[in-house]
Amino acid sequence: GPLKVGIVGVTGAVGQEIISVLHKRGFEVSELKLFASARSSGKPMDTPFGSLMIEEFELEAARSCDVLFLAVSGDFALEWVPKLTAEGGPLVIDNSSAFRYDDSVPLCVPEINADVARKSKKRLVANPNCTTAIALMALAPLHKLFGIKRCIMSTYQAASGAGAPGMRELEEGVAAMSRGEKAENSVFAHPLPFNVIPHIDKFLDDMYTKEERKVTWETRKIMGMPDLLVSCTCVRIPTLRAHAEAITIECEKPVDVAAAIEALKNSPGVKVTDDPAANIYPMPLTATGQYDVEVGRVRKNDVFGDYGLDLFVCGDQLLRGAALNAVLIAEAVA
Ligand code: 2RA
């Protein structure tokens, strides 16, 4: 039946998308509570559910919900999740990385491992990193078919990964440069327009970035393959809100491109976008705003003899990468 739903961080890019996904998917909402910081609260917000007052986050009001989406920082989650999920609290779906690597917390892409979230006694489910969720929409069906031994990935990540401020910095930078002025940067380490930045999140001791290791850690956890070999290079590029990813896998069994395409065509959340003769392949331009992740450029990779497969994946970072995946978790678990 209808549920009382709360969204914390409702004025951010992900929070905004959660409202529109709830409505578009016809999620049965008895009441929608919008929570934000003191600075952003106390004013109405137009939503498909009507004009709703933005409230300052408050523990008991948030605990009164049946489902609570957190679209805020990891620090906020670390501080409030224990109190929110105490006895009698809501199902909490956290978009931050705060609890993703906690063995007792399910990390869920519903099309792949919804049962892990359903079986959990915890009233907390972690939403995966956007880059991981988008890649896994293609990797999970391919693993079922051929058994993946190792994976090498290069990503082309949109400014929306840094939220509305990231998108704004890119847009303002492009406008500045078109006026012959310098693009300013504070969100990203360097100006993004007409550039690419191989640096997302902080550098670790192994010289990977935390973003790159999140892909490794989270792929292993969601696929239930703790020893899977995954190496990723994560690069910020000047697109607004769709991540693109070039993926190479080495499989246990010999790969067959036609079988791969067929399996991908039958995978929920995937749209095979692969007709090179017609210049059809995944692109941010066409993947943006879509619920399905585009998969194409599927081809045998002879570097691994008969066992290699290359593909290119593109998905909306705010949807599959965050808001859509979170709402699908609520549909599967609540
Ligand atoms: C990014 N995946 O793209 C990270 C966090 N959303 O910035």
Image (spheres, rainbow, N blue to C red):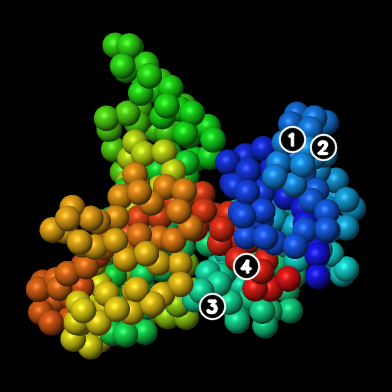
Label 1 CB, ligand 1: below 8 Å? no
Please state the horizontal and vertical placement of residue 166, each as a whole percent of the image. 48, 34
Q: Is residue 333 in sight in this rendering?
A: yes
Q: Which of 108 and 151 lies nearest the eye of the viewer?
A: 108
Q: Which residue is mark 3?
A: 113
Count of marks overlaid on the render: 4
Q: Are marks 2 and 1 in contact (CB under 8 Å)?
A: yes
The mark nearer the N terminus, 3 or 2, is: 2
- Quarter of the image with the N terminus is bottom right
| Residue visible at 54% across and 77% down in the picture | 113
Q: Nearer the viewer, mark 3 or mark 1?
A: 1
Q: CA distance from mark 3 to mark 2?
A: 35 Å
Residue 299: name its quadrant: bottom left
Residue at image location 53% in from the left, 32% down from the top:
165
Residue 141, given in percent of the width and then of the height, sits at 37, 78
Horizontal and vertical percent for residue 67? Answer: 76, 62
